[in-house]
Amino acid sequence: MPVPEPNGFGSDPPEDRRASAGSRLRDGLRPLRSLRSRVTVDVHAHTSYSDGSGIPLMVDAAEAAGIDAVGFADHCSLSQAWRDERLLWNRNFDRTYARRREALSAVADRTDLTLYDAVEMDYEPELEGRIRDFLDEAGFDYAVGSVHYVAGKQVFPFESFADASEAERRAFVDDYYDAVVSLVESELFDVLAHADLVENHPALHGLTTAAHRERVAAACADSPTVPEINAGRAGDRGEFDLFHPTRPFFEAFRDRGVRFVVGTDSHDPEDFADRVPRLERYLDETGVEPIGTEELLSGSGDGSPVATERGPSGPSEAS
Ligand SMILES: [Zn+2]
Ligand SMILES: [Zn+2]
C-alpha cells in the first residue's frame, strides 16, 4: 500500500513523526488537525513572564498541538499584598508586559500561529479603579479576569483550610462568588477565567450551590465578559480531573444562552498536546461552538494580533 505524503510528513523519520504529534498521520487518514475543527484558538496560556515556560517553547508546542492561534495571558496583580514575593520571582507582569510584547513581536515571524498579547488579571473589587487605569494604559489585545485571592486567602489547593469550620468554608465560597459576580459586572474584562475555581480545592469542592451558579450565569448573560471553558485542571494536573466550569455550572450558563471561549491554561509546553484534545472531546460532547477571536476582540484593545515589528536583525541582537 502506498504511503500517503500530505504535508511532507510521509518522508520524515519515525522519531520526527512522534515529535509532531499534532499533525501525525494514522493509517493513511488525513492529519489529525483536520478533524479538530472546534479548538482553533486557545485564549489562555502562560509564559515565563509569569509562572509558565519560555516563549519559544510554548509557541512551538502550541503550533504542534494543531491550533491556529494562542493568547498569552500572563498573571498580573496590582495588589500590594503579594508584591514582594512576585518581585523575587520576576513575576511582576505589571512592570514587564512591555518586554513580553517586544518578545512576542520577535517570535511572531517564526511561527504560523496567530499570537495575542493578553493578560490574566487578578481581580479584587477594591482594585477596580487601578485595574481600569492599568488596562487602559497597557492596551492588551484582550484581558482575562480571575479571582485567585479572596479576603487574604488564595483559592488554590496549597492554601490550607484545615482549621476552618464548614460554615467558614461556605462563607469563603460565598465571598468568592461575590467577587466573580463583581468581576463580570465591572465589564473590565473580555474573559472570565475558570468561573468555579473553588471546585478544584479539596476543602471547597462541592460547596458551590445552584444559587451561586445562577448569579454568575445571570451576570454573564448581561455582560460582554465571556466565560472560559478552562482545561487547566483536567486530567491528572488538577485535584479532581475537572473542567471549569464544572458540568452543572456549564448548564446554568447554557440555559441562559451564554457563549464561551476555550483556554488550556497551559504553563508547560506539554500541556498543549494534552489539553487541546481534551477540549476537543468536551466540545464534541456538548456541541459548543466557541466564540471566535474577531467577536471577542471587537470590544477591546486595538483588536489586532501581534504583528512582526522588528526589522532585519542578526543574532547579535541577543547579546
Ligand atoms: Zn487562573
Ligand atoms: Zn492561568
Image (spheres, rainbow, N blue to C red):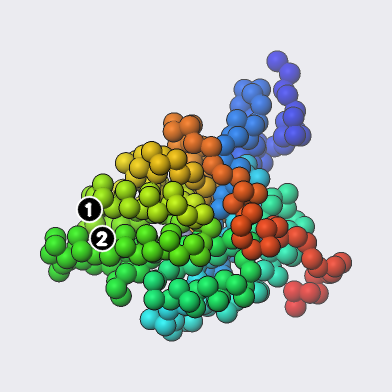
Q: Residue at x 73, y 18 (%)?
A: 2
On screen, residue 111 versus residue 243, left or right, reads right
Q: Residue at x 45, y 40 (%)?
A: 257
Residue 254 is drawn in which quadrant?
top left
Q: Residue at x 51, y 65 (%)?
A: 188
Q: Position of residue 20 (x, y in %)?
A: 64, 41
Q: Residue at x 43, y 76 (%)?
A: 127
Which of 153/111 is in front? 153
Q: Amino acid at mark 1?
A: Leu
Q: Position of residue 40 (x, y in %)?
A: 61, 42
Above-or-below relation of 157 to 294: below
Q: Quadrant of the C terminus?
A: bottom right
Residue 207, numbered circle: 1
The alpha-carbon separation of the residues under discs 1 and 2 comes to 7 Å
Which residue is identified by label 2?
Answer: 173
Q: Is mark 2 within 8 Å of ligand 1?
A: no
Tally the marks: 2
Whether residue 237 is visible to the viewer of this picture, yes or no, is no
